[in-house]
Image (tube, grey):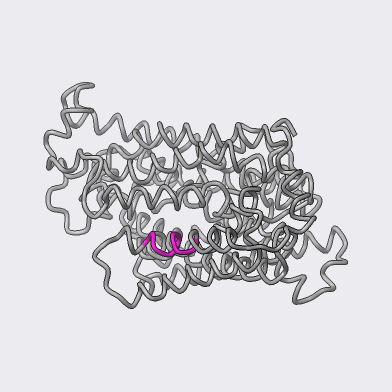
């Protein structure tokens, strides 16, 4: 990196801190801090949902997959996310917004005490917080790897840098700082992604036709929709996982819908995010698909994107691309910290310390900032020790994807009247069953990636549905009333 690159990166960090400081004056209560007071417009919520859906890991772990396996990455990642989010737009997203209006929730797990009971809520809240520590730590480690490729800076320094910046602005400004930074980060990402795409097309030296002729220089299987171990089965598993994740099982994404002003607004936001997933990754991922053309027999494919940027882009533009990678990661880690803090301060701590329920608005806001600070600090420590958990890919895919399903199924299906007979027993059994399958598979060597990732969520799904089907108990009045309110017109 040249001096100009460092200047561009420094300006980006200053922008983040400036937005955080501006947002500080908009935050008057914990509702403002966690849900922006329910005032997010659909376009800002949609962009934030999209940008918060992936991190710098795309340019490390996923870049390695694009190098070795090609176009299948778009199919099982971006395309399945687009489909899942579009389905969520019509069946799930509006319900999150109505929950805030009806119950007054500030965290995604807050409604579970009404839908199931306190025990179920606490199990999901505690399990989700622990899982998010691994997931967010993996994202911090991913961006540190990229900074190391670009500048030679130690990975420890990179983790502390990106974690520290995130720690400051999200603690100060809450969700408002997060979503406006998402918007700024999306603009930076567009500029950097399009620049890199054009540079690669120029390097191929076949005009606009290079977009297609490039594939002729790669192994035939790299242009296929499926490339072992990323099979049809794996893509279907990821579709199921992504549905539960992007419709709100990943808590920070649920917050984008909760913070929308109405069900109609939340639906429009989800549709916008879905369309971005269908279109934008085709440009964003293209340089990664083309990497083997320029970098033959790379020993560590996860470094491919970083190497191409440093070799092909002039000074200044390298800093812009690196800023966009930081943007992706900070968007996800900051929103994670904000939402997990909401779960801790709204759903976990009041059970341990009942006096918190009587906190004033000022004290509740102070608690929100303290829990955000503490959670982010823990994720930084996890990132510093990511090598103990299978590296970046191991943390984000093998751990997070496999563990997400067991806790997200009761959350998402609990919103739908068709599953109203699946009570707390079904919820807890499905969670325990899914986590048990995950643990068993960790001790048994797996040849199928689809089985390793998908078995826990499929086990949870079957248990939740089957136990509810055979449940002969009468559905509680408050559950029926909850579902009735969540089925209102999308304009509400």
> 255 or 178: which is nearer to us?
255
Q: Position of residue 376 (x, y in %)?
A: 58, 64
> 57 or 438: which is nearer to us?
438
Q: Which residues are magenta?
A: 453-460
Instruction: Note whether 436 is above or below 14 in the view shown.
Output: below
> Can see residue 154?
no
Q: Position of residue 243 (x, y in %)?
A: 49, 47
Q: Quadrant of the C terminus?
A: top right
Q: For the point 59% across and 40% down, which residue is it? A: 91
Instruction: Note whether 192 is above or below 453 in the view shown.
Output: above
Q: Position of residue 471 (x, y in %)?
A: 63, 63
> 471 or 44: which is nearer to us?
471
Q: For the point 59% across and 35% down, which residue is it? A: 269
Q: For the point 72% across and 32% down, which residue is it? A: 489
Q: For the point 69% across and 39% down, which residue is it? A: 260
Q: Position of residue 222 (x, y in %)?
A: 19, 42
The quadrant in which residue 454 appears is bottom left
Is most of the magenta stretch helix, strand or loop?
Answer: helix
> 25 or 463: which is nearer to us?
463
């Amino acid at each position: 990196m040249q001096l100009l690159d460092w200047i561009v990166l420094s300006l980006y960090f200053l922008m983040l801190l400036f937005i955080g400081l501006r947002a500080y004056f908009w935050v008057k209560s914990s509702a403002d801090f966690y849900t922006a007071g329910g005032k997010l417009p659909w376009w800002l919520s949609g962009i934030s949902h999209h940008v918060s859906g992936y991190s710098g890991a795309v340019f490390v772990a996923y870049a390695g997959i694009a190098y070795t396996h090609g176009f299948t990455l778009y199919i099982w990642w971006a395309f399945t996310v687009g489909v899942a989010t579009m389905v969520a737009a019509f069946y799930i997203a509006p319900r999150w917004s109505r929950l805030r209006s009806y119950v007054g929730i500030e965290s995604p797990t807050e409604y579970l005490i009404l839908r199931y009971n306190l025990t179920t809520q606490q199990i999901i809240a505690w399990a989700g917080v622990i899982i998010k520590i691994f997931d967010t730590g993996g994202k911090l480690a991913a961006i540190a790897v990229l900074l190391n490729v670009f500048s030679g800076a130690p990975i420890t320094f990179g983790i502390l840098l990106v974690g520290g910046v995130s720690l400051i602005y999200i603690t100060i400004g809450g969700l408002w700082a997060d979503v406006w930074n998402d918007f700024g980060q999306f603009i930076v990402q567009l500029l950097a992604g399009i620049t890199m795409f054009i540079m690669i097309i120029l390097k191929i030296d076949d005009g606009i036709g290079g977009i297609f002729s490039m594939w002729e220089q790669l192994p035939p299987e790299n242009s296929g929709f499926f490339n072992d171990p990323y099979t049809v089965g794996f893509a279907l598993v990821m579709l199921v996982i992504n549905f539960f994740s992007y419709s709100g099982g990943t808590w920070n994404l649920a917050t984008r819908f909760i913070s929308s002003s109405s069900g109609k607004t939340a639906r429009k936001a989800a549709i916008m995010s879905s369309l971005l997933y269908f279109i934008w990754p085709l440009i964003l991922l293209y340089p990664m698909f083309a990497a083997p053309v320029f970098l033959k027999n790379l020993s560590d494919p996860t470094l491919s994107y970083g190497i191409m940027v440093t070799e092909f882009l002039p000074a200044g533009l390298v800093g812009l691309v690196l800023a966009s990678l930081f943007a992706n990661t900070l968007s996800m880690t900051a929103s994670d910290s904000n939402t997990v803090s909401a779960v801790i301060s709204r759903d976990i701590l009041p059970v341990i310390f009942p006096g918190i329920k009587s906190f004033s608005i000022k004290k509740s806001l102070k608690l929100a900032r303290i829990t955000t600070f503490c959670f982010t600090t823990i994720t930084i420590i996890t990132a510093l020790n990511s090598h103990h958990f299978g590296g970046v890919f191991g943390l984000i895919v093998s751990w997070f994807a496999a563990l997400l399903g067991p806790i997200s199924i009761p959350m998402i299906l609990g919103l739908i009247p068709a599953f109203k007979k699946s009570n707390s027993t079904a919820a807890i059994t499905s969670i325990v069953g899914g986590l048990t399958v995950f643990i068993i598979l960790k001790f048994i060597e797996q040849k199928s990636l689809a089985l390793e990732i998908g078995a826990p969520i499929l086990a949870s799904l079957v248990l939740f549905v089957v136990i509810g089907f055979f449940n002969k108990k009468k559905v509680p009045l408050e559950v029926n009333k909850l579902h009735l309110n969540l089925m209102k017109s999308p304009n509400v």
